[in-house]
Amino acid sequence: MLQTEFDFTLPMGYVDAEGNVHREGTMRLATAMDEVIPMRDPRVKSNEAYLTIMLLARVITRLGAIQQVNTGVIESLFTTDLTFLQDLYRRINESGSSQVEIVCPGCQRHIAWEPTPLGE
């Protein structure tokens, strides 16, 4: 069965206007339109780096109690969280999995590993 949604925990968390921290979320696999539509946006045309913001706002379906994850939410993330989400986006859309393969330095065995944020 194809997994299309992946749960995550942000290293720092999104802090809303009331001071609540939202760390638990879900990201879905991107579609072709998720990558095409932002290319038409004037913010992306004037600054290609904004593509990341728009992509993440489209594919993050849940972030704590936030009802609507939009570009404003993504813009307000700490850099650590943005980097974490960019990496997760790449992993799930390139391999269909949030796991990475690592090699045990002692026995050279290949291990599927699910990265977790620092401090957990």
Image (cartoon, helix red, strand yellow):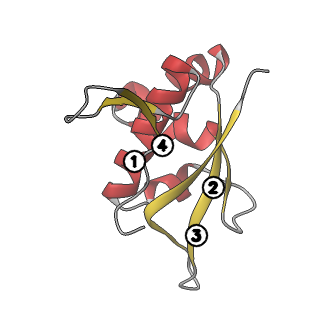
Q: Amino acid at mark 3?
A: His
Quadrant of the rendered structure where residue 63 is?
bottom right
* Residue occupied by mark 2: 25
Residue found at the very far front of the displayed protein: 107
**Badge 2 local density, few (<14 within 10 Å), some, or many (20+)?**
some
The C terminus sits in image quarter: bottom left
* Residue occupied by mark 1: 84
User: Image point 41% across, 31% down: which residue?
Assistant: 111
Q: Amino acid at mark 1?
A: Phe
Vertical comparison of 18 with 27: above or below: below
Q: Which disc, if any, is residue 63?
A: none
**Badge 4 local density, few (<14 within 10 Å), some, or many (20+)?**
few
CB atoms at circles 1 and 4 under 8 Å apart? no
> Which callout, 1 or 3, points at the residue further toward the start of the chain?
3
* Horizontal side, residue 28 vs residue 18: left or right: right
Residue 107 in sight from this viewpoint: yes
* Residue occupied by mark 4: 114
The kind of secondary structure element at disc 3 is: strand
The kind of secondary structure element at disc 1 is: helix
User: Image point 72% across, 29% down: which residue?
Assistant: 4
Residue found at the very far bottom of the displayed protein: 18
> Which callout, 1 or 4, points at the residue further toward the start of the chain?
1
Q: Tell me residue 32's x, y (percent).
A: 63, 14
> Which callout, 3 or 4, points at the residue further toward the start of the chain?
3
Q: Tell me residue 49's x, y (percent).
A: 34, 34
